[in-house]
Image (cartoon, rainbow, N blue to C red):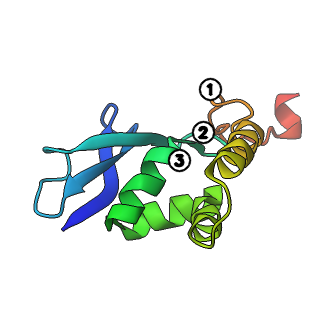
Amino acid sequence: MVRIRLRKIGAKAQPSYRIVVADKEAQRDGRFLEILGFYNPRTEPATITVKEDLVYDWLKKGAQPSESVTRIFRSAGLLDRFERLKKGEELETLLAEAKTAEAARNTNPKTERAAPHKKSSPAQA
């Protein structure tokens, strides 16, 4: 069985992930068939970049997304667009909509979550 799942990249304690198509028995960071996108949960909001035309192709072929990838796709609106594609909507229309949604979602991909500020006591002022 072929799965769409996350492949960890990045340094220790600084994870980011590639969204890949891999055989179900392959290791998490092992052999994969194709890279479909990128996911970085450390930015605010999380950066999600997906090649939707490739995802649609693999979903049509029967690839099953993992639970975490399903949540990512749902938050990006990809699964709703895939349902509309199955009902007969034009692929070009959906891809144009996806491009505008991605531009709005990934406003500043280099922004990281801000560290919590320490409250200063009046004695320090």
Q: Nearer the viewer, mark 1 or mark 3?
A: 3
Query: Disc 1 residue type?
Result: Lys
Query: Disc 2 residue type?
Result: Thr
Cα distance in 3D space between marks 2 and 3: 21 Å
Q: Which residue sits at x=52%, y=66%?
A: 71
Instruction: Name the residue that disc number 3 marks.
Output: 52
Report x, y in % for residue 106: 69, 37
Instruction: Name the residue that disc number 1 marks.
Output: 110
Nearer the N terminus, badge 2 or badge 3?
2
Q: Which residue sits at x=63%, y=55%?
A: 76
Q: Which residue sits at x=62%, y=51%?
A: 91
Nearer the N terminus, badge 1 or badge 2?
2
Cα distance in 3D space between marks 1 and 3: 22 Å
Q: Is any part of residue 17 visible from this angle?
A: no
Cα distance in 3D space between marks 1 and 2: 7 Å
Q: Is residue 57 above or below residue 109?
A: below
Instruction: Name the residue that disc number 2 marks.
Output: 43
Nearer the N terminus, badge 1 or badge 3?
3
